[in-house]
């Protein structure tokens, strides 16, 4: 019988030459450059979508006192310095000061990409991880910052409420039925959250491990006076500087509300708006600030003008520079 012809060898699914070609193609793709431009592109789309709001805020500033507006700009810049001190106070390791400040400036732009401060949190976790901190400790530092900042903000609010109990008149704006519904909703949500943590074992173990890490770090930090001072001093200075910026804009537009009442309105509005998960607080913070200023005695038109000018200075003016800095941090592999 004739010999059987040898069967040809099966061709591999992925030839070495093809794999090499694909790798060289991946190398040619400017992935990091694309990531650098992504924040600027997203912010540009965001600006186009809210161009009418930005234009309204800019128009309110033309008739305002420029010196008070410059004061508002200065307090906004000092707010990033205060946040940098507070972030440094959450870790024992010394963070590079210039990169830390640039990260806080860029985090403001990142905050407009995702709701509830997730964008800024992601940027800060990436920065601390790049500085050599393990992810668990970076997350614990982030939680400690939020706890300190919320404690300082609520503490200032309570002090001003005790000092000026009649400053906010919410009765005509929020009927008792509405306020009761809001309180009931918050209590119900808190109950569901606690029940979920208690009844789901994986979630419970994750929360317990996280709390142990966070408490151990907090204990170590408070044994270092410099870190404790940076954490609580920065956390207290940040809302004070923000409220002072709103006072400066109110004075620039000649809003007929006492400065202490404006500060109280700001703290109350931001505390309520923090519950609404809107990117950058667009919409929720604006509405809450207008309502709070009206409750403090300002006319609706004047309160709206003040809020538009204030948000233009604190949000829209630094938005594109912040996106550029964020792109640079990504390019230099800092975040």
Image (cartoon, rainbow, N blue to C red):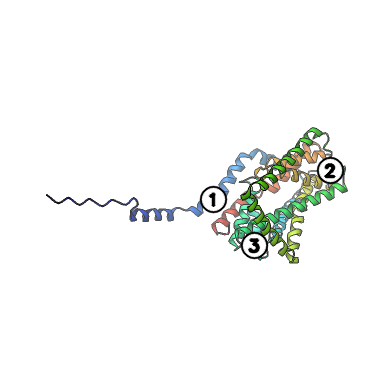
Measured Cα–Cα span from mark 2 to mark 1 = 43 Å
Looking at the image, tell me whether mark 2 or mark 1 is earlier in sequence order: 1
* On screen, residue 45 above or below 84: above
Q: Is residue 63 above or below residue 146?
A: above
Q: Are marks 2 and 1 in contact (CB under 8 Å)?
A: no
Is residue 109 visible to the viewer in this orientation of the structure? no
Which comes before the other along the chain, label 3 or label 1?
1
Label 2 neighbour load within 10 Å: few <14, some 14-19, many 20+: some
At a point 70% along the width and 53% down the height, the residue shown is 146
Q: Name the residue tied to disc 1.
A: 37
Residue 117, can we see it? yes
Q: Residues within 10 Å of mark 3 (few under 14, many from 20)?
A: few
Question: For residue 187, what is the image quadrant?
Answer: top right
Which residue is identified by label 3?
Answer: 98
Q: What is the C-alpha distance between the residues marked 3 and 1?
A: 22 Å
Under circle 3, the secondary element is helix
- Tag 3–tag 1 contact (CB < 8 Å): no
Residue 257 got which mark? 2
Place of residue 311 in the rendered image (x, y in percent of width and height, measured from the top left): 71, 45
Circle 2: element type: loop
Q: In the image shown, does 296 or 65 lie closer to the viewer?
A: 296
Which residue: 87% across, 48% down?
162
């Amino acid at each position: 019988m004739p010999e059987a012809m040898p069967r040809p060898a099966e061709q591999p699914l992925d030839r070495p030459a093809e794999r090499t070609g694909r790798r060289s193609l991946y190398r040619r793709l400017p992935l990091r450059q694309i990531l650098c431009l992504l924040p600027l592109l997203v912010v540009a789309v965001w600006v186009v979508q809210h161009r009418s709001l930005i234009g309204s805020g800019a128009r309110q500033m033309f008739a305002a006192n420029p010196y008070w507006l410059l004061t508002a700009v200065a307090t906004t810049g000092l707010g990033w310095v205060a946040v940098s001190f507070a972030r440094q106070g959450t870790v024992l390791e010394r963070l590079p000061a210039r990169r830390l400040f640039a990260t806080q400036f860029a985090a403001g732009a990142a905050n407009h990409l995702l709701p509830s401060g997730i964008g800024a949190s992601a940027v800060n976790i990436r920065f601390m991880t790049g500085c050599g901190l393990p992810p668990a400790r970076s997350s614990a530092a982030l939680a400690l910052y939020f706890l300190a900042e919320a404690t300082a903000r609520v503490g200032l609010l309570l002090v001003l409420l005790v000092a000026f109990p009649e400053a906010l008149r919410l009765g005509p704006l929020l009927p008792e039925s509405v306020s009761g519904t809001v309180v009931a909703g918050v209590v119900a949500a808190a109950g569901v959250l606690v029940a979920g943590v208690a009844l789901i074992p994986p979630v419970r173990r994750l929360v317990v491990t996280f709390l142990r890490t966070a408490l151990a770090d907090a204990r170590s930090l408070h044994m270092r006076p410099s870190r404790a001072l940076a954490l609580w001093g920065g956390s207290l200075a940040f809302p004070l500087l923000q409220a002072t910026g709103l006072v400066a804009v109110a004075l620039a537009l000649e809003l007929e509300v006492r400065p202490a009442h404006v500060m109280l309105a700001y703290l109350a509005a931001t505390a309520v708006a923090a519950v609404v998960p809107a990117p950058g607080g667009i919409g929720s913070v604006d509405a809450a600030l207008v309502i709070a200023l009206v409750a403090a005695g300002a006319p609706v038109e004047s309160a709206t003008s003040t809020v538009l000018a204030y948000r233009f200075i604190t949000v829209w003016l630094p938005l594109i520079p912040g996106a550029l800095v964020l792109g640079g941090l990504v390019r230099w592999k800092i975040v």
